[in-house]
Structures are given as structure tokens and as C-alpha cells.
Image (tube, rainbow, N blue to C red):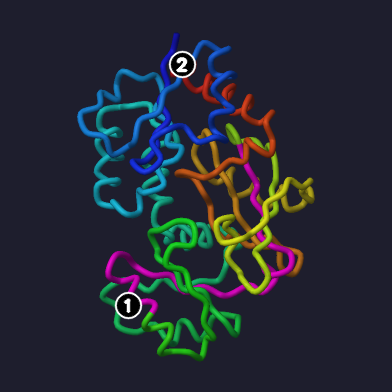
Amino acid sequence: MKKAVFLTCGKYPDISDSDRLTVPYLTSLGISVTAVPWTRRGVDWGQYDAVVMRSGWDYYRHYGRFLEFLGDLESAGTALWNPPGLMRWNSHKSYKLDLAGRGIAVTPMVLWQRGRTDVTQDINRLPSDRVVVKPAVGLSAFGVSRHDKSDVTGIGKAVRRIHRQSDAVVESYLPDVETAGESSFVFIGGEFTHHVRKIPKAGDFRAQPYLGSREFPEEADPDYIRQARTIIRSLPVTLYARVDGIVTGGRLLLVELELIEPHLFFDLYPDSAGKFAGALAGLIKSG
């Protein structure tokens, strides 16, 4: 029996309800799976044939330790998925500037690094009347706020709060999110498997269920799948990936590329849990 471990977090140490749907499939493929918080000390990660980051939802709160953790497993040659270098790159939202440099359509953004006193001119060039301010290291809607682009004082205060912990990102606000919502394209083993639409509650722009958004399965437009696939094909090998985007003007703009701990919506698409198990089994077999 091969051994896999799903990395979780201290507050939610067990396998999530959605990820639990993969367990019977993994068992049928000869793979046992357990859950261990990634922050636990003294674990022999080398005992596992695959270490899979799944619900490590607190990594941004312990960012320095998280980077050390990735480095330790990388140095030890541990079979970590997704690969540690890829998660390290994805953990800071400057990755979107990297993708934009490769020709990927991303939400227009300005990176306001700690130590930079003023990027107002760069913000003024963003093609929108409103902007969203968010931490460069963070997840969900943590630290996210919306402002009129002319509200220099409000933007500055939001950025200074974020700078206590992280660099900040100021990006164009896309009003289409209020009506069309945000689209999540899930890829398992590099292949598109399913799509979920997320609609914020009335008057909001944040597409998280705990803030009142709705999530539902939906057949995706083939052209938008193609655009999302272009992003995935620009990456090294992945076990899982989620492309979150907003369609505006007939084009999918990347909002977030989730390669660390995304919810993969196995609860909405139970068959995809089997595809995940098959992809992981293939990676274990290939060594």
C-alpha cells in the first residue's frame, strides 16, 4: 500500500469534506491517505510516497515558516504536490506580473511593495474608475477592500495596513463580477475537469461563500476553457490547479491562479474526485 498525506492546517486538521470524497478512490488504487497539519513539528515527511498540500489555509499567516517548509521538503527531495518551487512562486501575487509578461490576460494591477513610498501615478493609469486593494500574500477575501481610484487617502490607509504584513496589490475593479460573477476552472493532472460559477451577494464583489456568495456547477464556454488551459500549459507539471477569472469584453481575465490550497469542488462534481485520485496515483507511479 502506498502512503499519501494531505497537508491541512491547525484550525482544520482533518481532511475537508470535499477532499474526503477522494479517499475511497485512492484506497481502491492502493493508496492510503491521512491528514497532518503542515505546521506540525517533527514529522518524517519522507515516509510518504506523496505529500499533497490541500487545506493549509493558514500559510499566509505564517509566511516565513511556510517558505522554510517548502525549502526543507525541496532539499530533502520529498514528493510534494504541487511542486515546492511552483507553490513558492504562486504564494506572492507578483506571479500575475510574471504571467502578464508571458502574454496571459490578467486583471490590470500595480504591485505596491513595502518600502515604496508612492505609486499613485501607476494606479492612475489603471483602466478603471475603482480599484481593489489586497495583500500580495493572502487568500480568500482577507484584507481586501474596494475604493474609488480618486480616493488616494483611503487607498493609502488600506495599503499601510497591509504593509504591516505583506506587499500590497492595487488592481482594476471589474464591475462584471457583480452580475456575471467569477468563474473557476478546475484542472486535474493538467486537464480541464469542471467549472463553477461564483456569484457575490447583492452589493458585494467578493466571491466567497462565507460572505454570502453562491456557487453552482455550470458548463463552461469552450473558448474560456481554452483561455484557461493556456495558463495551465505555461506551468510545470501540476497535480491540481484552479483558474479564477472574470469574463469581460469576451475575454477571460485572470483574477487568481490557485496552486496551493484551492477548494476543488469535488462536492459539486463527485466524479472528479476519482480523476484526482487517478492523477495522484500516476504521479506516485512515475516516481
Q: Which residues are magenta?
A: 158-187
Q: Where is 32 relative to 101, above or below?
A: above
Q: How many marks?
A: 2
- Image quadrant where one finds the N terminus: top left
Q: Residue at x 50, y 23 (%)?
A: 283
Which amino acid is tagged 2? Ser
Reading the image, the residue beneath label 2 is 32
Contact check, label 1 and label 2, Cβ < 8 Å: no
Q: Position of residue 112 (x, y in %)?
A: 37, 74
Q: Residues within 10 Å of mark 1 (few under 14, many from 20)?
A: some
Can you say whether 152 is above or below 168 in the image?
Answer: below
Residue for point 55% across, 46% down:
234
Residue 186 among those drawn in magenta: yes
Q: Earlier in the sequence, mark 1 or mark 2?
A: 2
Query: How far from the left and from the top, in percent, is residue 242?
Result: 58, 46
The residue that disc 1 covers is: 160
182 sits to left or right of 220: left
